[in-house]
Amino acid sequence: MIFSLLVYAAPHSHQAAESAYRFAVATLAQGHSIHRVFFYGDGVHSASALAAPPQDELDLPARWQALAQAHELDLVVCIAAAVRRGVLDANEARRYEKPGHNLREGFELSGLGQLAEAAIQSDRLITFGA
Amino acid sequence: MSHQKRFLVISRHPPYGSCHARDALDTALTSAVFEQPVTMLFMGDGVLQLIQAQQPAGIQQKNLAATLSALPLYDIEQLYVCASAMQQRGLKAEDCVLPVQLLDSNAIAELIRQHDVVLSF
């Protein structure tokens, strides 16, 4: 089965952000495929390269990045939600004349259309934390 | 994208306390742009989004009604509200900025069953 995930919850604030990651791992382990993981709302903070959680806590951005590398996952971050919250790639940092950028490698900023496309292409779209 | 899916966007949060209401509307409008048939259902405090003559400028917020009134322009005309949520808050269909249909819980279950994609905010 083809899954897509919508991650709406912020990491470290809501368990749902971690549940999404664990669901992705379980989905792939069961032999299903993941068309896209879409980060929206406060979920965009899972794409930050600057998060520095204590060593005995789950580093979600790093885990997503590693999972994406291992399984060629499409990790898409809603660009409107991200730039509002200060999650920028180099292009957006230039566009808004900001002093730095922090979108983690393995993630990509794009429009909300990528969520609609994921819902159309997938057998199941599962929401976490809305 | 060859095939169409029936989208149901459920909006459960009040208009200005969080970003949920705005994000639900943006998701509905974007899905409609992708030429998918979109239905919206307002439940719980989400029905408060529909009240006429809101004045959110006092808290430096944009009026959600402007976005709501765009729904018909995007062919999103199937708008439903949870009847008991309306009743609990003393609201009637005439209080709403757009024409809505009231549904009881059985009809809501049937509505959800009729859709391929359910996005709940």
Image (cartoon, rainbow, N blue to C red):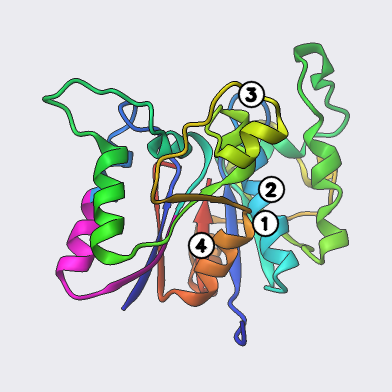
Residue at 63% of width from left, 60% of height from top? A113
**4 or 1: tag closer to the N-terminus:** 1
Q: Which mark is residue B25?
A: 2
- In the image, A60: left or right of B105? left
Q: Which residue is mark 1?
A: B28
Q: Position of residue A108 (x, y in %)?
A: 50, 51
Query: Does B99 sit above or below residue B96?
Result: below
Nearest the viewer among A115 and B10 is A115
Q: Position of residue B13 (x, y in %)?
A: 57, 36
Inspect the image, locate mark 2, and give the three-letter code of the amino acid beneath it: Leu
Q: Which residue is mark 3?
A: A98
To which chain does the residue with label 4 belong?
A: B
Q: Is residue B80 visible?
A: yes
The answer to whether dots 4 and 1 both sit on one chain is yes
Q: Which residue is mark 4?
A: B118
Identify the element where label 1 is drawn.
Answer: helix
Magenta residues, start to end: A22-37
Question: Which quadrant of the figure has residue B65?
Answer: top right
Pointers 3 and 1 in contact (C-beta within 8 Å): no
To which chain does the residue with label 3 belong?
A: A
- In the image, A116: left or right of A67? right
Query: Does B77 sit above or below residue B51?
Result: below
Front disc: 2 or 3: 3
Identify the element where label 2 is drawn.
Answer: helix
Nearest the viewer among A28 and B20 is A28
In 3D space, how far apart are the residues under numbered discs 3 and 4 (Cα atoms)? 37 Å
The answer to whether dots 2 and 3 both sit on one chain is no
Label 2: how many residues lie within 10 Å, few (<14), some (14-19) or many (20+)?
A: many
Inspect the image, locate mark 4, and give the three-letter code of the amino acid beneath it: Val
